[in-house]
Image (cartoon, rainbow, N blue to C red):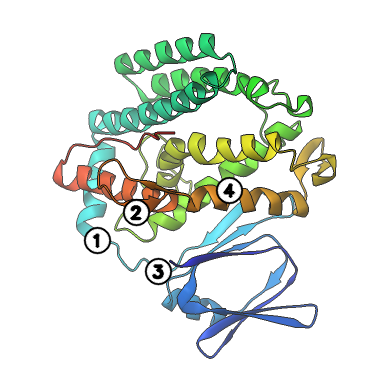
């Protein structure tokens, strides 16, 4: 399996024969190019066109994050698998509003199912979220009658706010109590974790889309507009509860993050480099966890399941093959 590499230090990314290497503080770390899938950059780096040409040939995406841990963009190499037919079918399903609404509903209903799976798990282990479980299940039913994307997203927003309210019950550390969702900038430590984790998931899905014939610019739940990518935002909704939120619960309930892993800036709170490294380590553990897939019967990682989800969507829009979103079995 190809690897993702995370760069936190400042330095230079260069090509050396058929490898790439990162040079920092006079030290060089060589990275066999055939083993690379994505490069994630959190530090300040220098690179040149020669290097970008090389990684483009090798079909490696480079994801950039700024000093505050916000995603800033991706070097997305020339699409090597894109199919004109698939792109036309994607556009057709977007431009036909009823078709778009149907896909958006399938995605968000699957996301709701995964939220329910998470809450049922903790409810069965003594965390009283029974009232929220019932209410979220009721809200999910409302989605069946939504006639616009806006209605669908409003129901989803209400459901997710109630779900986030359960975080304070699931997380044993009172320092990370959830009050209200705040984004740019996050106003407290729990919001800093949610925002960073969601950004990681959006980028992970984008890297997987590159390995398919789908075009990341055409989404269904999130509007296709001047935003560079939107399909990754759609599919990420399915996996945020079972990857991002479980990562948050694990590292906090193990007391792996402390006050020293955060810093304040511009009236907000963010993870520092040390905190981001801890988060990414557990995030990767979750992504690489393997399970027996309920449909295909073989053992696969969650990261692979994201790719399979994209294949299912592609089959649906090109061959009208019934789509059933991935629901975790914890």
Mark earlier in primary sequence (1, 3): 3
Mark earlier in primary sequence (3, 4): 3
Residue 37 vertical placement versus 86 (above, below): below
Question: Which quadrant of the figure has residue 72?
Answer: bottom right
Pick the front one: 147 or 167: 167
Q: State the image coordinates of residue 235 (x, y, percent, origin top left).
A: 41, 41
For mark 1, what is the residue? 83
As helix, strand or loop, the secondary structure at mark 3 comes to: loop
As helix, strand or loop, the secondary structure at mark 2 comes to: loop
For mark 4, what is the residue? 283
Give the alpha-carbon distance from disc 1 to disc 3, as whole Å: 13 Å
Give the alpha-carbon distance from disc 3 to disc 4, as whole Å: 28 Å
Q: Are marks 2 and 1 in contact (CB under 8 Å)?
A: no
Query: Left or right of 80: which side holds 111?
Result: right
For mark 3, what is the residue? 78
Q: State the image coordinates of residue 76 (x, y, percent, origin top left).
A: 47, 63
Mark earlier in primary sequence (4, 2): 2
Mark earlier in primary sequence (1, 4): 1
Residue 122 vertical placement versus 211 (above, below): above
User: How many numbered marks does the figure carry?
Assistant: 4
Mark earlier in primary sequence (2, 3): 3
Query: Left or right of 96: which side holds 203?
Result: right
Give the alpha-carbon distance from disc 4 to disc 2, as whole Å: 26 Å
Residue sitting at 32 percent across and 50 percent down?
308
Pick the front one: 83 or 60: 60
Residue 215 has which mark? 2
Residue 297 visible in rendering: yes
Q: Nearer the viewer, mark 1 or mark 4?
A: 4
Give the alpha-carbon distance from disc 1 to disc 4, as whole Å: 32 Å
């Amino acid at each position: 399996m190809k690897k993702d590499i995370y760069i936190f230090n400042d330095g230079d990314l260069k090509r050396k024969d058929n490898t790439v290497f990162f040079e920092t503080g006079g030290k060089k770390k060589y990275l066999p190019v055939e083993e690379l899938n994505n490069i994630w950059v959190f530090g300040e780096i220098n690179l040149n066109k020669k290097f970008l040409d090389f990684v483009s040939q090798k079909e490696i995406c480079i994801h950039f994050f700024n000093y505050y841990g916000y995603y800033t963009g991706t070097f997305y190499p020339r699409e090597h698998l894109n199919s004109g037919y698939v792109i036309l079918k994607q556009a057709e399903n977007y431009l036909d509003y009823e078709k778009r609404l149907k896909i958006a509903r399938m995605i968000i209903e699957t996301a709701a199912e995964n939220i329910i799976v998470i809450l049922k798990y903790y409810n069965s282990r003594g965390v009283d979220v029974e009232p929220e479980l019932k209410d979220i299940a009721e809200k999910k039913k409302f989605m069946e009658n939504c006639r616009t994307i806006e209605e669908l997203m409003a129901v989803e927003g209400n459901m997710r706010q109630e779900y986030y309210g359960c975080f304070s019950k699931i997380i044993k550390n009172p320092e990370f109590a959830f009050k209200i969702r705040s984004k740019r900038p996050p106003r407290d430590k729990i919001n800093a974790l949610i925002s960073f984790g969601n950004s990681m998931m959006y980028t992970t899905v984008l890297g997987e889309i590159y390995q398919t014939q789908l075009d990341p610019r055409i989404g269904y739940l999130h509007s296709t507009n001047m935003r560079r990518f939107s399909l990754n935002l759609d599919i990420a909704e399915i996996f945020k509860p079972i990857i991002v939120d479980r990562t948050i619960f694990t590292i906090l309930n193990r007391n792996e993050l402390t006050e020293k892993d955060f810093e304040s800036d511009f009236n907000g709170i963010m993870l520092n480099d040390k905190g981001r490294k801890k988060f990414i380590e557990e995030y990767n553990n979750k992504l690489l966890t393997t399970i027996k897939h309920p449909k295909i019967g073989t053992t696969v990682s969650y990261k692979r399941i994201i790719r399979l989800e994209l294949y299912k969507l592609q089959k649906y829009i090109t061959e009208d093959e019934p789509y059933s979103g991935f629901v975790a079995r914890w």
